[in-house]
Image: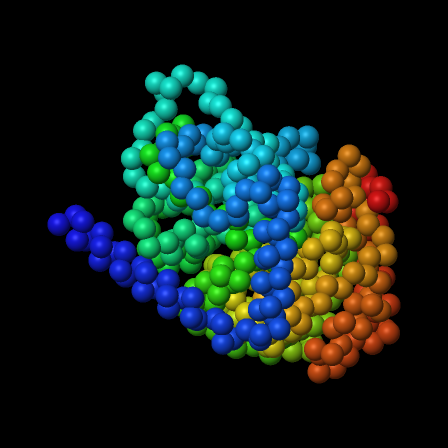
Amino acid sequence: MVSLLRLRVFAKRFQLWLGLRSFGRPRSPYAHRRWLRGQELEWESWVRQHHGGAPWRTQVLRDAAVQPFVDLLNRASGGEAYCGGVLFEDPQHQPVLRHFRGCDAIDRPLTRLDLPLSSVVRCDVRLFWCGPLVAHFGHQIADFSSRALRASLDPRYGELLWIPWRSATEWEALLPWQRSLLTYLNPGGKRHRFVCEHLRVGKLVIVPQQARMRAAPTLVHLEALGWCERAITPHSNRLVYVSRSRFARCTSSDTLVGAFAAELLLEKLLEDRGALVVYPEMLHLEEQLAIYVGAEALIVAEGSSQHCLELLGFHPHKQVVVICRREQLVGMDKPLRARFPQVQFVSALQQQWMAKDGVHWNGLALLDWKKVAEALNPLLPEPLTMDDCLALQRAGEDQLLTLSAHVPLKLL
Protein backbone atom coordinates (compact mmCIF):
# COMPACT_ATOMS: atom_id res chain seq x y z
CA MET A 1 0.00 0.00 0.00
CA VAL A 2 2.81 2.41 0.93
CA SER A 3 4.68 1.57 -2.29
CA LEU A 4 1.55 2.27 -4.37
CA LEU A 5 1.05 5.62 -2.64
CA ARG A 6 4.67 6.60 -3.27
CA LEU A 7 4.32 5.56 -6.91
CA ARG A 8 1.32 7.86 -7.29
CA VAL A 9 3.22 10.72 -5.65
CA PHE A 10 6.16 10.07 -7.98
CA ALA A 11 3.85 10.09 -11.03
CA LYS A 12 2.23 13.35 -9.94
CA ARG A 13 5.56 15.08 -9.38
CA PHE A 14 6.99 13.72 -12.61
CA GLN A 15 3.98 15.11 -14.47
CA LEU A 16 4.53 18.46 -12.72
CA TRP A 17 8.21 18.40 -13.66
CA LEU A 18 7.42 17.70 -17.33
CA GLY A 19 4.85 20.49 -17.41
CA LEU A 20 7.27 22.88 -15.79
CA ARG A 21 10.04 22.09 -18.24
CA SER A 22 7.73 22.93 -21.14
CA PHE A 23 6.50 26.13 -19.49
CA GLY A 24 8.57 29.29 -19.77
CA ARG A 25 10.49 28.37 -22.92
CA PRO A 26 8.02 30.11 -25.27
CA ARG A 27 8.25 33.26 -23.11
CA SER A 28 11.99 33.68 -23.44
CA PRO A 29 13.60 34.85 -26.69
CA TYR A 30 15.96 32.36 -28.28
CA ALA A 31 18.95 34.72 -28.02
CA HIS A 32 18.35 35.19 -24.31
CA ARG A 33 18.03 31.45 -23.67
CA ARG A 34 21.27 30.97 -25.60
CA TRP A 35 23.01 33.59 -23.43
CA LEU A 36 21.79 31.89 -20.25
CA ARG A 37 22.86 28.46 -21.44
CA GLY A 38 26.26 29.89 -22.38
CA GLN A 39 26.65 31.29 -18.85
CA GLU A 40 25.75 27.88 -17.47
CA LEU A 41 28.21 25.96 -19.64
CA GLU A 42 30.95 28.45 -18.83
CA TRP A 43 30.34 27.91 -15.12
CA GLU A 44 30.31 24.11 -15.42
CA SER A 45 33.60 24.27 -17.32
CA TRP A 46 35.09 26.49 -14.60
CA VAL A 47 34.00 24.02 -11.91
CA ARG A 48 35.59 21.05 -13.69
CA GLN A 49 38.80 23.03 -14.22
CA HIS A 50 39.15 24.17 -10.60
CA HIS A 51 37.74 21.14 -8.78
CA GLY A 52 39.59 18.22 -10.26
CA GLY A 53 37.07 17.46 -12.99
CA ALA A 54 34.26 16.95 -10.45
CA PRO A 55 30.76 17.09 -12.01
CA TRP A 56 28.27 19.88 -11.39
CA ARG A 57 25.09 17.84 -11.13
CA THR A 58 22.65 16.52 -8.53
CA GLN A 59 24.27 13.89 -6.32
CA VAL A 60 23.14 11.55 -3.55
CA LEU A 61 25.33 11.25 -0.45
CA ARG A 62 24.87 8.15 1.67
CA ASP A 63 25.36 8.21 5.41
CA ALA A 64 26.01 11.96 5.21
CA ALA A 65 26.79 14.03 8.29
CA VAL A 66 25.07 17.40 8.75
CA GLN A 67 25.66 19.88 11.53
CA PRO A 68 24.23 23.28 12.51
CA PHE A 69 26.01 26.36 11.18
CA VAL A 70 28.97 27.58 13.18
CA ASP A 71 28.90 31.07 11.65
CA LEU A 72 27.05 32.81 8.84
CA LEU A 73 26.84 36.28 7.24
CA ASN A 74 29.50 37.58 9.60
CA ARG A 75 32.39 38.53 7.34
CA ALA A 76 32.08 42.28 7.97
CA SER A 77 32.81 41.63 11.66
CA GLY A 78 35.71 39.28 10.96
CA GLY A 79 33.67 36.07 11.07
CA GLU A 80 32.59 33.55 8.45
CA ALA A 81 30.30 34.08 5.47
CA TYR A 82 29.22 30.42 5.46
CA CYS A 83 30.46 27.71 7.82
CA GLY A 84 28.44 24.59 8.63
CA GLY A 85 25.84 22.36 7.05
CA VAL A 86 26.82 19.19 5.20
CA LEU A 87 30.26 17.84 6.13
CA PHE A 88 32.80 17.26 3.38
CA GLU A 89 34.89 14.22 2.67
CA ASP A 90 37.03 16.15 0.17
CA PRO A 91 36.21 19.85 -0.40
CA GLN A 92 38.34 20.02 -3.54
CA HIS A 93 36.34 17.29 -5.27
CA GLN A 94 32.85 18.09 -3.92
CA PRO A 95 31.99 21.44 -5.52
CA VAL A 96 28.21 20.84 -5.33
CA LEU A 97 28.52 21.15 -1.55
CA ARG A 98 30.43 24.42 -1.73
CA HIS A 99 28.70 27.79 -1.48
CA PHE A 100 29.62 30.27 -4.21
CA ARG A 101 29.14 33.92 -4.99
CA GLY A 102 30.19 34.49 -8.56
CA CYS A 103 33.20 32.20 -8.99
CA ASP A 104 34.33 32.58 -5.37
CA ALA A 105 33.69 29.84 -2.81
CA ILE A 106 32.88 31.86 0.30
CA ASP A 107 32.41 28.94 2.68
CA ARG A 108 34.77 27.32 5.17
CA PRO A 109 34.28 23.57 4.66
CA LEU A 110 34.06 21.35 7.73
CA THR A 111 35.19 17.73 7.51
CA ARG A 112 34.42 16.29 10.94
CA LEU A 113 31.96 16.57 13.81
CA ASP A 114 33.33 17.95 17.05
CA LEU A 115 31.19 15.74 19.29
CA PRO A 116 30.75 12.02 20.00
CA LEU A 117 28.70 9.91 17.59
CA SER A 118 26.28 9.08 20.40
CA SER A 119 25.02 12.68 20.23
CA VAL A 120 24.20 12.49 16.51
CA VAL A 121 20.55 11.89 15.52
CA ARG A 122 20.00 9.25 12.84
CA CYS A 123 17.58 10.06 10.01
CA ASP A 124 16.53 7.40 7.50
CA VAL A 125 14.10 9.62 5.55
CA ARG A 126 15.47 10.84 2.21
CA LEU A 127 16.33 14.51 2.68
CA PHE A 128 17.04 17.22 0.11
CA TRP A 129 19.68 19.73 1.18
CA CYS A 130 18.34 23.31 0.95
CA GLY A 131 20.82 25.17 3.16
CA PRO A 132 20.48 27.83 5.85
CA LEU A 133 17.28 29.61 6.81
CA VAL A 134 17.99 33.18 7.95
CA ALA A 135 16.01 36.27 8.88
CA HIS A 136 17.84 38.43 6.31
CA PHE A 137 15.37 38.92 3.43
CA GLY A 138 17.83 39.64 0.63
CA HIS A 139 20.40 36.97 1.46
CA GLN A 140 17.75 34.29 1.99
CA ILE A 141 16.35 34.85 -1.49
CA ALA A 142 19.53 35.60 -3.46
CA ASP A 143 22.05 33.55 -1.53
CA PHE A 144 20.44 30.61 0.23
CA SER A 145 17.21 29.46 -1.45
CA SER A 146 18.10 28.38 -4.96
CA ARG A 147 18.40 24.65 -4.22
CA ALA A 148 14.86 24.41 -2.85
CA LEU A 149 12.84 24.75 -6.06
CA ARG A 150 14.64 22.00 -7.97
CA ALA A 151 14.55 19.83 -4.83
CA SER A 152 10.80 20.35 -4.48
CA LEU A 153 10.23 19.30 -8.08
CA ASP A 154 12.41 16.20 -7.85
CA PRO A 155 10.02 13.25 -8.40
CA ARG A 156 11.59 11.26 -5.57
CA TYR A 157 9.89 11.12 -2.19
CA GLY A 158 11.60 13.05 0.60
CA GLU A 159 11.72 16.19 2.74
CA LEU A 160 13.39 19.58 2.32
CA LEU A 161 16.14 20.08 4.92
CA TRP A 162 16.80 23.57 6.30
CA ILE A 163 19.23 24.61 9.04
CA PRO A 164 17.95 27.75 10.82
CA TRP A 165 20.48 30.42 11.75
CA ARG A 166 19.18 32.96 14.27
CA SER A 167 15.73 32.16 12.97
CA ALA A 168 12.67 30.35 14.27
CA THR A 169 12.80 26.57 14.08
CA GLU A 170 9.08 25.76 13.70
CA TRP A 171 6.80 26.59 10.78
CA GLU A 172 4.25 28.56 12.83
CA ALA A 173 6.98 30.73 14.38
CA LEU A 174 8.67 31.69 11.08
CA LEU A 175 8.39 35.26 9.82
CA PRO A 176 5.44 35.70 7.42
CA TRP A 177 7.74 36.32 4.45
CA GLN A 178 9.73 33.18 5.29
CA ARG A 179 6.58 31.05 5.22
CA SER A 180 5.49 32.68 1.97
CA LEU A 181 8.90 32.16 0.38
CA LEU A 182 9.16 28.51 1.37
CA THR A 183 5.63 27.86 0.10
CA TYR A 184 6.31 29.66 -3.19
CA LEU A 185 9.48 27.64 -3.80
CA ASN A 186 7.77 24.33 -3.01
CA PRO A 187 5.27 23.62 -5.81
CA GLY A 188 5.98 19.89 -5.37
CA GLY A 189 4.48 20.05 -1.88
CA LYS A 190 7.33 18.36 0.00
CA ARG A 191 7.47 18.63 3.77
CA HIS A 192 9.92 21.17 5.21
CA ARG A 193 12.18 19.90 7.97
CA PHE A 194 14.00 22.42 10.22
CA VAL A 195 16.93 20.93 12.13
CA CYS A 196 19.13 22.45 14.83
CA GLU A 197 20.96 19.26 15.81
CA HIS A 198 23.68 17.07 14.35
CA LEU A 199 22.34 14.54 11.85
CA ARG A 200 23.48 11.38 10.16
CA VAL A 201 21.34 11.05 7.00
CA GLY A 202 20.94 7.74 5.16
CA LYS A 203 20.28 9.44 1.80
CA LEU A 204 20.94 13.14 1.29
CA VAL A 205 20.18 14.60 -2.16
CA ILE A 206 22.39 17.56 -3.08
CA VAL A 207 21.03 19.83 -5.81
CA PRO A 208 23.75 22.24 -7.04
CA GLN A 209 23.24 25.94 -6.47
CA GLN A 210 20.83 27.10 -9.14
CA ALA A 211 21.50 30.78 -8.53
CA ARG A 212 24.54 32.59 -7.19
CA MET A 213 24.97 36.21 -6.26
CA ARG A 214 26.87 38.01 -9.05
CA ALA A 215 25.93 35.28 -11.56
CA ALA A 216 23.05 34.33 -13.85
CA PRO A 217 20.74 31.52 -12.66
CA THR A 218 20.40 28.24 -14.50
CA LEU A 219 17.88 28.09 -17.32
CA VAL A 220 15.92 25.31 -15.60
CA HIS A 221 15.67 27.32 -12.37
CA LEU A 222 14.42 30.37 -14.24
CA GLU A 223 11.82 28.34 -16.11
CA ALA A 224 10.69 26.83 -12.81
CA LEU A 225 10.23 30.32 -11.37
CA GLY A 226 8.07 31.13 -14.37
CA TRP A 227 5.87 28.21 -13.35
CA CYS A 228 5.67 29.46 -9.74
CA GLU A 229 4.77 32.92 -10.98
CA ARG A 230 1.49 31.62 -12.40
CA ALA A 231 0.03 31.69 -8.88
CA ILE A 232 0.46 35.49 -8.70
CA THR A 233 -2.48 37.82 -9.47
CA PRO A 234 -0.83 40.99 -10.88
CA HIS A 235 -1.63 44.48 -9.59
CA SER A 236 -1.57 46.64 -12.70
CA ASN A 237 0.47 49.84 -12.49
CA ARG A 238 2.23 51.87 -15.16
CA LEU A 239 5.24 52.82 -13.02
CA VAL A 240 6.34 51.67 -9.54
CA TYR A 241 9.11 53.06 -7.36
CA VAL A 242 10.49 50.61 -4.76
CA SER A 243 11.77 52.80 -1.94
CA ARG A 244 14.34 52.22 0.79
CA SER A 245 13.64 55.41 2.73
CA ARG A 246 11.56 53.95 5.57
CA PHE A 247 13.97 51.07 6.15
CA ALA A 248 17.12 53.21 5.93
CA ARG A 249 16.14 56.65 7.20
CA CYS A 250 19.81 57.55 7.78
CA THR A 251 19.02 59.99 10.58
CA SER A 252 21.02 58.23 13.32
CA SER A 253 23.67 55.54 13.76
CA ASP A 254 20.92 52.91 14.18
CA THR A 255 19.21 53.85 10.91
CA LEU A 256 22.41 54.32 8.86
CA VAL A 257 22.12 51.02 7.02
CA GLY A 258 22.84 52.04 3.45
CA ALA A 259 20.96 54.48 1.22
CA PHE A 260 21.34 57.43 -1.08
CA ALA A 261 20.52 60.92 0.18
CA ALA A 262 17.42 62.89 -0.86
CA GLU A 263 15.31 59.80 -1.48
CA LEU A 264 12.27 61.37 0.19
CA LEU A 265 12.29 64.23 -2.30
CA LEU A 266 12.76 61.79 -5.19
CA GLU A 267 9.67 59.92 -3.99
CA LYS A 268 7.61 63.11 -4.08
CA LEU A 269 8.82 64.03 -7.56
CA LEU A 270 7.98 60.55 -8.86
CA GLU A 271 4.57 60.52 -7.16
CA ASP A 272 3.77 63.86 -8.81
CA ARG A 273 4.45 62.11 -12.13
CA GLY A 274 2.06 59.25 -11.41
CA ALA A 275 4.38 56.62 -9.93
CA LEU A 276 3.23 54.29 -7.17
CA VAL A 277 5.74 54.39 -4.30
CA VAL A 278 5.96 51.16 -2.29
CA TYR A 279 7.80 50.29 0.91
CA PRO A 280 8.53 46.55 0.62
CA GLU A 281 9.26 46.00 4.31
CA MET A 282 5.63 46.93 4.98
CA LEU A 283 4.14 44.49 2.45
CA HIS A 284 3.61 40.73 2.43
CA LEU A 285 5.82 38.87 0.00
CA GLU A 286 2.80 37.91 -2.14
CA GLU A 287 1.76 41.55 -2.43
CA GLN A 288 5.27 42.63 -3.43
CA LEU A 289 5.36 40.02 -6.18
CA ALA A 290 1.88 41.01 -7.41
CA ILE A 291 2.99 44.65 -7.71
CA TYR A 292 6.23 43.79 -9.49
CA VAL A 293 4.57 41.42 -11.96
CA GLY A 294 1.84 43.93 -12.80
CA ALA A 295 4.07 46.98 -13.23
CA GLU A 296 4.94 48.10 -16.75
CA ALA A 297 8.16 49.68 -15.43
CA LEU A 298 10.04 49.54 -12.12
CA ILE A 299 12.44 51.96 -10.49
CA VAL A 300 14.25 50.34 -7.57
CA ALA A 301 16.47 51.79 -4.86
CA GLU A 302 19.34 49.31 -4.58
CA GLY A 303 18.97 47.09 -1.53
CA SER A 304 17.63 43.80 -0.24
CA SER A 305 14.18 44.42 -1.71
CA GLN A 306 15.53 44.15 -5.26
CA HIS A 307 16.24 40.47 -4.62
CA CYS A 308 12.48 39.86 -4.47
CA LEU A 309 12.56 40.35 -8.25
CA GLU A 310 14.75 37.24 -8.42
CA LEU A 311 11.66 35.16 -7.61
CA LEU A 312 10.22 35.97 -11.04
CA GLY A 313 10.74 34.31 -14.40
CA PHE A 314 11.36 35.90 -17.82
CA HIS A 315 10.00 39.43 -18.42
CA PRO A 316 11.71 40.49 -21.63
CA HIS A 317 9.62 43.65 -22.10
CA LYS A 318 9.54 44.98 -18.54
CA GLN A 319 11.74 48.05 -18.00
CA VAL A 320 13.66 48.04 -14.73
CA VAL A 321 16.00 50.78 -13.45
CA VAL A 322 18.09 50.18 -10.32
CA ILE A 323 19.52 53.30 -8.66
CA CYS A 324 22.82 52.23 -7.08
CA ARG A 325 24.05 53.56 -3.76
CA ARG A 326 27.58 52.09 -4.08
CA GLU A 327 30.03 50.89 -6.68
CA GLN A 328 28.88 47.62 -8.24
CA LEU A 329 31.01 44.46 -8.25
CA VAL A 330 31.46 42.54 -11.49
CA GLY A 331 28.40 40.42 -12.22
CA MET A 332 26.00 42.12 -9.78
CA ASP A 333 23.69 42.90 -12.70
CA LYS A 334 23.42 39.31 -13.96
CA PRO A 335 20.68 37.94 -11.66
CA LEU A 336 18.28 40.67 -12.79
CA ARG A 337 19.52 40.81 -16.38
CA ALA A 338 18.60 37.12 -16.72
CA ARG A 339 14.99 38.00 -15.90
CA PHE A 340 14.74 41.51 -17.34
CA PRO A 341 17.01 41.95 -20.39
CA GLN A 342 16.22 45.68 -20.42
CA VAL A 343 17.40 46.29 -16.84
CA GLN A 344 19.59 49.35 -16.31
CA PHE A 345 21.84 49.93 -13.30
CA VAL A 346 22.44 53.64 -12.72
CA SER A 347 25.87 54.27 -11.18
CA ALA A 348 25.88 57.99 -10.39
CA LEU A 349 27.90 58.03 -7.19
CA GLN A 350 29.45 61.41 -6.35
CA GLN A 351 30.51 60.73 -2.77
CA GLN A 352 29.88 58.04 -0.20
CA TRP A 353 29.97 58.75 3.50
CA MET A 354 30.06 56.07 6.16
CA ALA A 355 30.11 55.95 9.93
CA LYS A 356 33.59 55.77 11.41
CA ASP A 357 34.65 52.10 11.82
CA GLY A 358 31.60 51.02 9.86
CA VAL A 359 31.17 49.10 6.59
CA HIS A 360 30.89 50.83 3.25
CA TRP A 361 27.56 49.31 2.19
CA ASN A 362 25.94 50.93 5.24
CA GLY A 363 27.01 54.38 4.09
CA LEU A 364 25.05 57.34 2.78
CA ALA A 365 25.65 58.20 -0.88
CA LEU A 366 25.39 61.56 -2.65
CA LEU A 367 24.35 61.05 -6.27
CA ASP A 368 24.81 62.95 -9.50
CA TRP A 369 21.13 63.61 -10.12
CA LYS A 370 21.66 64.68 -13.71
CA LYS A 371 22.79 61.11 -14.53
CA VAL A 372 19.86 59.66 -12.60
CA ALA A 373 17.41 61.92 -14.43
CA GLU A 374 18.80 60.83 -17.81
CA ALA A 375 17.97 57.22 -16.92
CA LEU A 376 14.54 57.90 -15.43
CA ASN A 377 13.12 60.46 -17.84
CA PRO A 378 12.30 57.96 -20.63
CA LEU A 379 9.93 56.28 -18.14
CA LEU A 380 8.25 59.48 -16.94
CA PRO A 381 5.35 61.36 -18.58
CA GLU A 382 7.00 64.61 -17.45
CA PRO A 383 10.82 64.70 -17.22
CA LEU A 384 12.87 65.63 -14.18
CA THR A 385 14.21 69.13 -14.85
CA MET A 386 17.51 70.77 -13.99
CA ASP A 387 15.69 72.59 -11.18
CA ASP A 388 14.55 69.21 -9.82
CA CYS A 389 18.13 67.93 -9.96
CA LEU A 390 19.42 71.02 -8.10
CA ALA A 391 16.70 70.58 -5.46
CA LEU A 392 17.71 66.93 -5.02
CA GLN A 393 21.36 67.92 -4.70
CA ARG A 394 20.54 70.46 -1.98
CA ALA A 395 18.25 68.01 -0.15
CA GLY A 396 21.02 65.41 -0.15
CA GLU A 397 23.58 67.82 1.23
CA ASP A 398 21.13 68.95 3.94
CA GLN A 399 20.44 65.32 4.93
CA LEU A 400 24.17 64.61 5.17
CA LEU A 401 24.70 67.74 7.28
CA THR A 402 21.89 66.73 9.66
CA LEU A 403 23.23 63.17 9.96
CA SER A 404 26.80 64.36 10.64
CA ALA A 405 25.55 66.23 13.71
CA HIS A 406 24.67 62.86 15.30
CA VAL A 407 27.07 60.39 13.68
CA PRO A 408 30.85 60.74 13.09
CA LEU A 409 31.23 60.30 9.33
CA LYS A 410 34.14 59.85 6.99
CA LEU A 411 34.39 60.07 3.22
CA LEU A 412 34.98 56.74 1.56
Q: Name the spot of residue 257 as percent of width and height, x first.
A: 68, 46
| Nearer-the-camera pick, 14 or 180 | 14
Q: Farthest residue in the bottom direction?
A: 381
Residue 109: percent from the left, percent from the top?
56, 31
Q: Residue at x 44, y 55 (%)?
A: 149
Q: Residue 369 location in percent, x, y?
A: 82, 66
Task: Work out which residue is located at the far front of the displayed protein and give it.
Answer: 53
Q: Is residue 131 above or below residue 272?
A: above
Indicate the quadrant containing the C terminus: top left, top right, bottom left or bottom right: top right
In the rendered view, would you say 322 is above or below 251? below
- Residue drawn at the location 37% of the way across and 35% of the way down: 62
| Residue at 56 percent of width and 33 percent of height | 91
Query: As rendered, which of 342 and 6 lies closer to the eye?
Result: 6
Q: Residue at x 42, y 70 (%)?
A: 22
Residue 386 location, quadrant: bottom right
Q: Can the viewer see residue 33 in this picture?
A: yes
**Residue 232 visible (yes or no):** no
The colour style of the image is: rainbow
Number of marks = 0
> Left of 227 or right of it: where is 410?
right
Frontmost residue, 184 versus 280: 184
Horizontal and vertical percent position of residue 229:
45, 67
Looking at the image, residue 208 sits to the left or right of residue 192; the answer is right
